[in-house]
Every structure is written in C-alpha cells, then in structure tokens.
Amino acid sequence: MPDPNQTATPVAATRPDPGGAPLQSGAQARPGDPDARNELGNSLLALGRPEAAAQCFREAIALEPGFAEAHFNLALALRSQGQTGAAMQCLRQAIGLRPDFFQALFVLGNLLWDAGDLADASACYREAIALEPGFAEAHFNLGNAARALGDSRDAEASYRRALQVRPHFAQAWNNLGQLFKDRNRIEEALECYGRAIEIDPGLAEAHYNIGVARQLDGRFYEGLAHFEQALRHDPSYAPARWLHDLSLPILYERPEEIRELRQRFGVHLSRLIRETPLDSPGDRRRALSGVASTTHFFLQYQGQNDRDLQREYGGFLQRVLAAGYPQWSSRPPMPALGPGERIRVGYVSSFMRDHTVGQFLLGWLEGHRRDRVEIFCYHIGSDTDAVTDRIRARADVFHQVGGHLEAAAGRIAADPLHLLVYTDIGMNALASQLAALRLAPVQCKGWGHPVTTGLPSIDYYLSSDLMEPDDATAHYSETLVRLPNLALHYTPPPLPARPLARPDLGLRADAFVYLNSQSLFKNLPQHDDLYPRIAREVPHAQFVFISHSRPAVTARFRDRLARAFDAHGLPADRFCHFTRRLDFQGFLSLNLASDALLDTLEWSGGKTTLEALGCGLPVVTCPGRFMRGRHAFAMLRMMGISRTVAADKDEYVRIAVRLAHDPHLLAEMRSEIAGRIDRLYRDTAFIGALEDFYAAQVRAHRRAPHPGERP
C-alpha cells in the first residue's frame, strides 16, 4: 500500500463584485473612474488575461490609492502569474485599508499555506472567521491546516463547524473522513466519504479515498475499481491514476498473483511515464500530486530484485520534481570546511519517534563524535514522543519541518550541509520527493528501509557489510558503502520486571511456542507450507502471529494459512494463534514466553530479531538473496552462532523441529545467546567508518567539483 494521506487544497475565495457586468466600452467611457478600471480588470481576469487585468487594477489604485478591492484583485492577478510575494503584499495593503476584509485574510491564508507557513495561515483563517463566523471555507481550511500540523482534534472541530454552517459541504465530509482514516477508524471514514458522494456524486477525491480505504482493509481489487470510478469523474485526477497503476496488495493469495501483479506494475509504470506531460504549470501540478500519493511500498515485499523498476520510477520522480522545483534540481557546491569546523551532516526522517527507523537513527546519533560531526535533524513527520526528545538532544540543530514539501526543502537547502542522509525513502512519499531533489552536495540513503531508491539524486547507499551478499552491488542504483558489522549502534531495552505469563497472552502452557513477530505482509504465500510441515513433526507446536492493525487483513492471512494446513491434512486453528497488538512491554513479554523465533523468508526481522535475541530466543533463519532477507543471519554471524542458520527451507524445518524435540540443544542455544549477546550492542566500529566516509566525501568534492554543480 502506498502512503494515501490527502492534504486538501484550500478552497478559493469568491472575488468581491464591485457591481455590474464590466465592459470595455463602459471603462473607456469613464477613463478616470477607478471602479471602471477595476471592473475591466475583473473581466480580463475572468477571460484568463492576468497581465492585462493587473495593469487595470494598478490604474484603479493610482486613481484611488485607498481602493481596497482593487488591491485585493491585483493580488489575485499576481497570484495567477505565480508572483506570490507581490500578491501577499497587495493583500496586506488591502487588509490595512479595510481591516474587516475577511476575503483578503482568507486568500492571504491560502498563499501562506502554499508557502508552507501553516501557523500564519491558520492565524489568517481564524481572523477571517472572527469577522465572518459563517465563513464555511475558512473553517474548512483551518481544519486542513490543523491536520497538516498533526492536530487531529482541532481539525475535526473545524470540519464540524464548517458542516454546521454548510451541511452539504461535500469536501468537508471528505476531509472529515480522512481524519477517521488517519485514526484507523475505516468504517467511519467510509461513512463520511459516502456522505460526500451523496452530495456531490462527481467528487473524484471521495471515490479515490474509498479506494484507499478498501485497500487498507486488504480489499485490493475493490480499491482499483474505486480508483477507476474516480477517473471516470475526473480523468485528470492524478492520485487516482497513480494508485490505479502502481498500488499493490498488502497480502497475496498465491505465488502466481505476485508474478501477475508485478508484471502489471511494470507495464503500468512505463505507460504512466510515457503519458505524463510536464510542459505546462497544470501538467506539473498534476504530476506532483500524483507522486505525492504513493511510494509503492509493497513492491519491495515481493522478494525480487527491484533495482530496475526502482531506477525507472526514480528517474521519473526526479524529472517530476525538477520540473516543479528547478531551483533545487542541481547539485550545490561543497562548502568549505574551515580549521576547527565539524562536518555538517543532515538527517531527514518522518520517523524521528518511537519507531524502528527512529530507534536506529538515534543509535547513529548517539554514536557520533560530537567533535567531528555537526548534526542537523529534519523531522518531516508530525508525531513526537520521548524518542523525539532524545534525538533533539543529540542534534546540534533540530527542525520539525512538518509535511509540506516546499517548506521542508527550503529549510534543508538553507543550511550549509556537506552531506544529507535520508532514512526512510520508500516508506513516506514526502521523503521520496525530497530525496529526488538536490538539497546537499552529497546525498545518501541509510538502511531504515533496506531497498535501493533508484533515484539519480542519491549518491550512496549506507549498508551493513555483514548483511550484504557477495553480489550486492547488482541490487543498487547507488554506490554501495558496506559499513562494518551491522551498521547499528543499538542499546537494548530493559526487560519487563513482571512479564505477562502465557495464559495472559493466550498461549498454551504445554506448547512449544514458535513466535513469528513480523508484520503479516512479510509472509509470502510460497512459504506458508513451513508451518504445517513443522506442525506435522511437532504435534504440541503453537505458532504465534501478531494481528494486523486491520482485522480484515488478519482474517485474510488466517484464511490463507488455513489453506496451507488443509493441504497437509492439519487443522490450522489447533496450531495457530493470533495475538492482539501489544504495547512494547507486552511484546517483550511475548518473546520471553516463547521458545523460538521463526524468521520470515525474503524479508528478515531487524529490530524484532535484536529484541528476540535479547530475550534469549533461538532464531531460526534462512538468509535470502538480498540484504533485506539477511538481517537475522548477520546478527547470528556476528555472535558466532550458526546452528540455527538454514541453507534452504528443508533445513529450516529440520532445525525448527529439532529445537522442539531436543531440550539439551535448546538450552545450549539459550546459553550461547546469553554469553554473546553483548557483541550486538553499542557497536562503535561502524561509526568510525561512517565518519571517515563523510570526511572523505568532503575532501573529494572540494578537490573536484561535480559537473553541473550550482555556482
């Protein structure tokens, strides 16, 4: 699934009508009449002639400098020409002349929104509402700003006030649905989208959002049908086109479906690239809204080499961003590094919080030598917590730039960075868009999402030497940098003093509990047979899976697993248990209550494997072809443990079975883990190598400027 968060475009204000249907002849008959010049300007603006209209408004202002409406209309003409700064100045003049001019405040708020200044935009909307409490569009846009700033409660209140003023405000119903979707309350979201469509059957955005909600519920093909419906109402609605062509299921029903949908993705991607013009401002706006709607996150969970598809999309993404933001499309020069100055490194992430990516980034920051690296952090997410505070404390400069592309890019580009590192390209649409720009002389990808970006604008992929196979360079469009060991500076969490017992977790007291702690979508259908094959040899086995946040997705996986057990003549319900989603202490308790961890094939566990090993769990793994399938293998290798590493699926089953039947082996494995676990923690070797790499890049780029570098 892609990331589908929809930021609504602010509603345009209605221009004040100073009276009459202006005609050229009437204006000519009253050459010294400012109203006549204003009327003519309105007519020209309506005819799509903003330059001529602006001249008329200037003439009206020259005749009557205090003509607030003419200043306002001049702002509209300038805005249509892309002269945002001049338009804002005109609006402020209009407001100064007429402090109750709520329409001018509203449009000023919209321009501030476009510039990424959501706080000042919100202030303008509030002033407009104070002057005109029944201004539904202002309530609506205030809700949009609150949502963009991460304030869901204020956003909902604003949308509901807009609906009190105008109950048939379809877009407000749609955006209220978006809030419910953000909260994972899909049924309530669907009800709101349905209300929007009842009011405006042609509202493509609402049809699109229904499609997104269906796919979040695991109903992939229903989602495609709704995207098609959105496109029937508005063929130019880019988010629906992008998701129709590039979205993929959360789960696959059968291996053949992976091949079919991968082929579909490739065909549609090539067609989308061919049929997406970038010539006009409208073309570029549509393309930008399309790339903002998806990351094709689930492509990487098909277990294939994604380099060529990633490179095809990455080149396209860079062209779209360069067309929209040419000022950030060429490489900036490498800043000088004066005596005593530190290397300035920026880190960009939407997960600077309690998340796997945030925890791994925090480890890098805590490992850095403060006398060598000056740390700049750019949090492009809205959620914050205690981990955010720790990241902020480790940074020399911390910016929470939010989810607005222009504001984030401008903030990053303004800092004189030597290198810029992105942690979650491919997980977040904004991160991918920013990474397609050239905001620093050297740009790198950290392994928060361990797949090549395909972006020409990303120079290096920072990876783990132990996790990469021998032929790893063939998997990346970037230059691969193999940092020592795991490329992690990991500090283990304290274990719960009073962990939950098996009965509290729904586990059988007499079972040999095999834990699968990965997201359900990491389990591919061609490997479902592992579980019944083990169960056939271990009658007292209990396989534990963690439920998906959407019950419908869990149900689909449960049904798929049941078919695999049926094929072996076994009842899945007897062997498989789906635990509720747990808080972190509950998750650690689940690990402590289990007997072994069964690693997923093709995409291995990362942080979850570190946590399982910290709880003493033996880990059965089968290293895959790509780095993302070799996390657990690398950890065991670093610990000098090989007895639970399988060469193929048959050996994987044999190891899992032997652990259940050989208490001596199980005890030996637990003892080995306990004695060697510290080898995984607080590794500083890779930090030194990382900082050496940073320093080498600064030296190399200062000696030899890159072709096409900005002066």
Image (tube, rainbow, N blue to C red):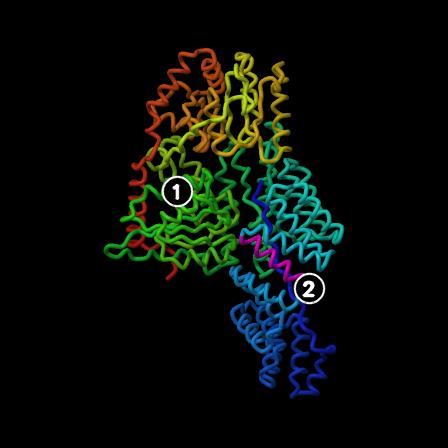
Residue 268 in picture, x, y percent from top left: 61, 43
Q: Is residue 213 visible?
A: yes
Which range is magenta? 136-149
421 w.r.t. 137: above or below: above
State yes or no: residue 143 in magenta.
yes
Relative to 516, is 444 above or below?
Answer: below
**Answer yes or no: do the residues labelled 1 and 2 have beta carbons within 8 Å?**
no
Residue 134 numbered tag: 2
Q: Earlier in the sequence, mark 1 or mark 2?
A: 2
Foreground mark, 1 or 2, reads 2
**Chief SS of the magenta region:** helix
Rendered view: 15 above or below 518: below
Residue at x 66%, y 71% (from the top left corner) = 15
Give me the residue at 36% from left, 42% from top.
364
Residue count near mark 1 (Cα–Cα under 10 Å), binned few <14, some 14–19, many ≥20: many
Q: Position of residue 184 (x, y in %)?
A: 61, 41
Q: Residue 315: in sight, yes or no?
A: no
Query: Which amino acid, by three-letter code, is at mark 1?
Result: Leu
Helix, strand or loop at mark 1? helix
